[in-house]
Amino acid sequence: MAAFKEQGFQERAALAAKAKQAAIEKLRAKPPVDEAVLAEQRKIAEARAAEQARVSAEKKAAREQAAAEKKAAREAAAEEARLAEEAKQKMRKVPTEAEMKAARDARYAARKARLKR
């Protein structure tokens, strides 16, 4: 068996040129691109892109609608809570002057009774 002989630069360059030439010949051997087929592929791609854009727009509109509904519900709940608080404030009984004096007098009497013991 012969020993392995490493290739020199000239041999590697020749092999690379030969491979490049083979690739070019293979590329030239392909049939030419038919313009009708190319136009049909472009039309299909454009239709697909338009469909994707339409679906994307529908999804975005649905998300925005849901967000708007959620915001409206939050605002309605806040308004309802505010109205309930206002109603609660109105319903709360405000003591009259006589009631306030009677409560003050009762506290005073209780304090005096505690101190007398």
Image (cartoon, helix red, strand yellow):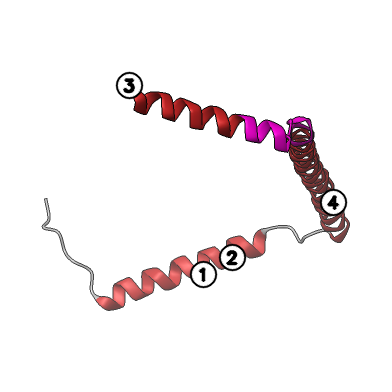
Q: Secondary structure at mark 3?
A: loop
The amino acid marked with disc number 1 is Gln
Query: Helix or strand or loop: what does disc 4 sit on?
Result: helix
Picture coordinates of residue 97, whole percent (x, y): 71, 38
Q: Which residue is mark 4?
A: 50
Disc 3 residue type (three-letter): Arg
CB contact under 8 Å: marks 1 and 3: no
User: Disc 1 vs disc 4: Cβ atoms closer than 8 Å?
Assistant: no
Separation (CA) of disc 1 from disc 3: 121 Å
Q: CA distance from mark 4 to mark 3?
A: 93 Å
C-alpha span from label 2 to label 4 = 39 Å
Mark toward the start of the polypeptide (1 vs 3): 1
Whether residue 33 is situated above or below residue 15 in the rendered picture: above
Q: Which residue is mark 1?
A: 21
Q: Secondary structure at mark 1?
A: helix
Q: CA distance from mark 2 to mark 3?
A: 121 Å
- Vertical arrangement, residue 102 with respect to residue 71, above or below: above
x, y (%) of residue 64?
A: 78, 46
Q: Residue at x 79, y 44 (%)?
A: 68
Q: Which callout, 2 or 4, points at the residue further toward the start of the chain?
A: 2
Number of the label disc, if any, that sits on residue 117: 3
* CA distance for labels 1 and 4: 42 Å
Q: Is residue 95 visible?
A: no
